[in-house]
Amino acid sequence: MILTRRQLNRTYLQRQLLTTTDAEPDPRPVEEVVAHLVAVQAQEVDAPYVGLWTRTRQPRHENLTEALTDGRVVRGGLLRRTQHLTAGADYRWLKPLLRQRLGTGGMSPFAAEFAGLDPADIGAAGRDILRGQTMTRPKLAKQLAERFPGRKGIALAWVVQLQENLIHPPPSGVWRRRGHVTCALAEDWLGGPLEERPEVWTLLSRYLASCGPASVADLQNWSGMKRLRDDVERERHRLRVYRDERGQELFDLPDLPVGTGEEEVPVRFLPEFDNLVLSHEDRTRIISDEDRARVCPGYSMVHPTFLVDGFVAGLWSVTATELTVTPFRRLSDADAAAVLDEAGRLRAFLQVDVAVRLDRP
């Protein structure tokens, strides 16, 4: 069966919870919503709050803050080695699987500082320092520098983070909180060991439930893991297979429906780095190749976006005086009104008393 781009778009929006309405908000606890999404981008502190609000239509910031405080949701380096939120229960299998398949790369910027040292020894020292407590990264760095004289402690702290199962508990990562990042051993914070033999099937099935149908390349792009073709092939008998309009093979869970492509969908605003625009190698189900370059202008930036008719239609930003909405193309009067209406809801959630301005391309 061939799925059109609009079918993939509507299916993706439904599975990403972006068809939820204000009249019928998602009633689930925040950790269940995060678990459905597997991992929520948290490169910027406030971004996951916006991303979860736009999906659930639940306006209470405290829902996520409380879940982070009691460990139902945790923050740490996960997909693509970048900061994400995940349910505490899911961290137990997701982090070990990513460590096994991604290794402990990313340390080359700090190579000069640990030259002649075994990174495993630095990781062990970090574990010893952090055991049973939470501390800021600068404090961890200071104690590491005392153990390894003549080395820059902050570089060693990053080596520990890349080597070990670290999470960043509150006050880090909560609404409007800026400052030094806090660090804790995941096993301490979660109150037990992580899984020793996590399975790729868990990752694959959970990814498809929130992002499918998808190709092997899509799964690799989302997770940061490579060489997954054989893993997926071993599970082919458990999957349904589609093709897109280019002939690309797409896998899905057999019991999940796909959209018709004709469904009406609401205008939605997404925060910076939202996984909606990062979860596939072929992202045309949500953004055109032309617009992708404007949303992702460099390796380390993904701008906040908004959706019209289910596709990325422009950018938004907030200053001390204004929430500015910048469409890529001229909007119809009806779409412009819907965008301004949703921008007003976003302003209320952001708790900012600013004007809303819609640019005219």
Image (spheres, rainbow, N blue to C red):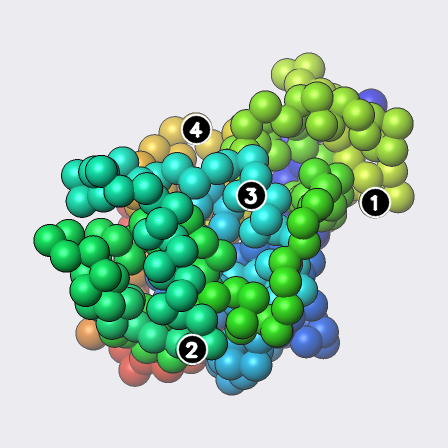
Image x and y of residue 121, in percent: 36, 49
Where is 187 relative to 232, above or below? Answer: below
Mark 4 secondary-structure assignment: helix
**Residue 256 disc label:** 1
Please tell me how crowded label 4 is: few (under 14), some (14-19), or many (20+) other residues with Cα within 10 Å: few
Residue located beneath label 3 in the image = 98
- Between the residue at mark 3 and the residue at mark 1, the CA separation in whole angstroms equals 26 Å
**Residue 104 disc label:** none
Residue located beneath label 2 in the image = 133
| Residue shown at the point (25%, 72%) measured from the top left | 139
Q: Quadrant of the C terminus?
A: top left
Q: Which amino acid is tagged 1? A: Leu
- Between the residue at mark 2 and the residue at mark 4, the CA separation in whole angstroms equals 46 Å
Image x and y of residue 190, in percent: 59, 71
Name the foreground residue: 42 vs 270: 42
Q: Which amino acid is tagged 3? A: Leu
- Give the foreground label among 4 and 1: 1
First reached walking from the N terminus: tag 4 or tag 3: 3
First reached walking from the N terminus: tag 2 or tag 3: 3
Q: Are marks 3 and 1 in contact (CB under 8 Å)?
A: no
Is 64 on the left-hand or right-hand side of 128?
Answer: right
